[in-house]
Image (tube, rainbow, N blue to C red):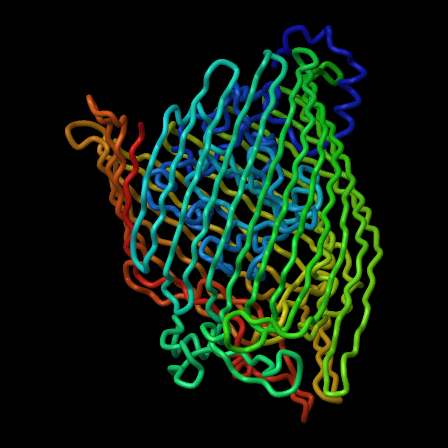
Amino acid sequence: MPPFPGSGLRPRALALLLALAPDAALAQGAPDTIALDEITVAGSGAPASPASGPSPAFGVAAPPGSAPSVIEHPVGEIVTGIGRRDVIANRPATGIGQVLVNSPGVTVRQGNGPRDVVVSIRGNNARSTGVIRNMVVLEDGFAMTQPDGASRFDLTDPRAYSRIDVFRGPQSPLFGNYATGGAIAFRTRTGREIDGYEVGVDAGSFGSLNHFFTVGGASGPYEVSLFASDYRLNGYQDHGSANTQTVNLLASYTPSPDNRFTLKVVNNTLDADLPARSSLAQYRINPYQRGCAAAATAAPGCTTINLFRNGAFGATVPVTADEGAFGRTDRRTIIAGRWEHDIDADTTWRMQVGFDERNFNQPFYTTSSRGSYPSYTVLTDITHRGEVFGLPAVGYAALSYSAIDNRIALYNRAPYGGPRLGALVSNQEAVQSNLGGRARTEVALSEQWTGILGVSAENTWLKGRTFTYAYSAAGVSPALANVDRSFLNVAPELALVYRPDTTWAFRGRVATGYATPAASALFVTPGGVPGNNTDLRTQTNLGFDLGADWSPLPDLRLSLTGFYEFFRNEFVTQSPGAGLLGYTFNAPASEHRGIEAGAEWAFSPGWRAYAAYGLNDQFYTRYVEQLSAGSLTARFDRAGRLIPGVPAHQLLARIGYDQPSGPLKGLGAFVEAVYQDGFFLDNANLLKVPGYTLLNANIHYDTDLVGAYAKRLSLYLEVRNILDTTTIASAQPLANSISAVTGLQNGASVLATTTGSIFAGAPRSLVGGMKLAF
């Protein structure tokens, strides 16, 4: 492969510095990346974009005026690109969960709200029931993950996006702290892609109604796209209604060929009623918690939560979700900007800053949390295309700083009368900051071989305190827990890609990841109440990936990846019981291994088949769990036990047809099956929840309107869960326990009657909609 034109004029010292200081991310909007572009098997039917479909060995440039993801398919990474076809554009995809299952290795669970899905990559984060951790989330290159590692998908409406890239495996060399499981990079539709405006509405079962609006265009140096939606739902469970509004703005200004400015604004508000999480036994009796308005007249299988009658201590009274007025009222606001400057034809410098504030009021279960998490991030980086020892190379180096101020008050709940507050339980104040550097180089070793070397180093400071208050007839007993800790982590990466011809690509990768504990986890005890848990350590992993991509025909793409990851001090979160806070601990050693496969085949005109499969085998290799009850304590060796919450198998298979020509051109349909295996709920592997298979069907029609005011009409109708299968959409892992009398471990029957774990999935539902483009 010949060197780039004019490479002899480049400053060789700068090229060598950037090449030997490997990192994280190839700057967006920079000149072409050195990408032996991976065959992305998910959603490759998306509209043409720089990262969809085969590309030259050194990639393609970002479209003018756009703000693509920070990472545009860098070489050697395990990345799946999800486009719009059969995923977003012609179906009522109101939640991101319906979209992300199109990537191998991704598991989706229901969170605490209509769009609050819990996403895990390779089983990481599968045990969470709300906040997303162990991955980094970006949108148009801006961080959607706060500096404490928390992300949520309430603000994520799929209709705003043109493509979503899912990075699998340890990604800290690319993204820094918290990327032990991977990363997700959303790309908003640009003004040029929209070129006008669109209005649409979806409506369906259980009172679901979604109005959305998109406008975008480009004029001279300006480009703007704006998306807004209003989504409302009565819910298929009692006390499960919600409404959420989202505004998403992407704007750019290019005053000269070598200067680009980008503005990003996202705002989301949420008001949701939450049902109570049931036990497995209650789920079997009353999966949708119907007839549970009042505890006194509740139907069999209804979940109740015991609240202190006086809101502080002593006698309790059982309440249902209705009587307790369980819910969430949250707001998330993100404002960020970036300046990109081309120093010369081969060097681009970026500077970006962002402000992110998460405000919440969450009166659900035994406590009510109120707080604000303002944060900000600063990133500066430089990308240089040059030569290293005569070989074409791209080097990247970056510095980043982020900080978050956590302030949260936790109150007991008081029964009846709406979401009444009881006594103050704890008051937490904590500040976390992260300072790190990343570097990366990609070198074209020959026409067929590309080598990648990367590293990140980051220091995290956590300083804070929490006051806790215990109440009794004698008065209040306050306690103080302080934390003042510093974590230094380094994560290297090495990868090789071999492409013998245009149809094959072989890749091998060794990479590491790290995730420091968040302040919220440091102040919850094993009993599920506020207190001291400040000894948590950094979670780290070392991962090995081997894979191949094969495209023997233009319309056939196959991908296979095997991975083996070794974890140290893995974060495991479980529920100590009904209504209690989730408790996080370090499992000293564990291993994750598995296979990921994807295929897409347009086997006949108009026909397309797609499949994504993931196999996960995750188990403890060193972990002794200590359990206590009364005056008795027992220790149990969990080595060899499967890690709870992680399904062994998951599969998405879809086949569809779109009429390519004639009077019915634009009419299409598809059917798909989503399979997820069962998984254990506890560390002892005593209780397992069942898996499921869901069948969905879709029919759609998309046509140009000739001579009309509107340019294009889209109609769609979808039946989800055709067979009306009762499923478990979310199950929080449960803590094992021992008998206070014998000291023996309690069996599966005790776990099966422990509430606070399960949300049922939606029954059969019908959703349809239309969209007009002008």
The x and y percentages for residue 572 are: 66, 63
What number of labels is visible?
0
Residue at 56% across, 71% down: 420
Q: Which of 336 and 164 lies nearest the eye of the viewer?
A: 336
The furthest residue to the left: 663
Report if residue 35 is visible in the image.
Answer: yes
Report if residue 543 is visible in the image.
Answer: no
Residue at 55% across, 23% down: 252
The furthest residue to the front: 417
Residue at 50% across, 74% down: 417
- Position of residue 443 relative to residue 179, above or below, is above
Q: Is residue 110 shown left or right of residue 579? A: left
Q: Quadrant of the N terminus?
A: top right
- Position of residue 645 relative to residue 92, above or below, is below
Q: Is residue 198 shown left or right of residue 348? A: left
Residue at 76% across, 50% down: 432
Q: Which of 577 and 479 lies nearest the eye of the viewer?
A: 479
The x and y percentages for residue 413 are: 59, 73
Q: Quadrant of the C terminus?
A: top left
Q: Is residue 100 shown left or right of residue 639? A: left
The x and y percentages for residue 47 are: 40, 28
Question: Looking at the rendering, which quadrant does residue 238 occupy?
Answer: bottom left
- Position of residue 137 relative to residue 345, above or below, is below
The x and y percentages for residue 573 are: 64, 64
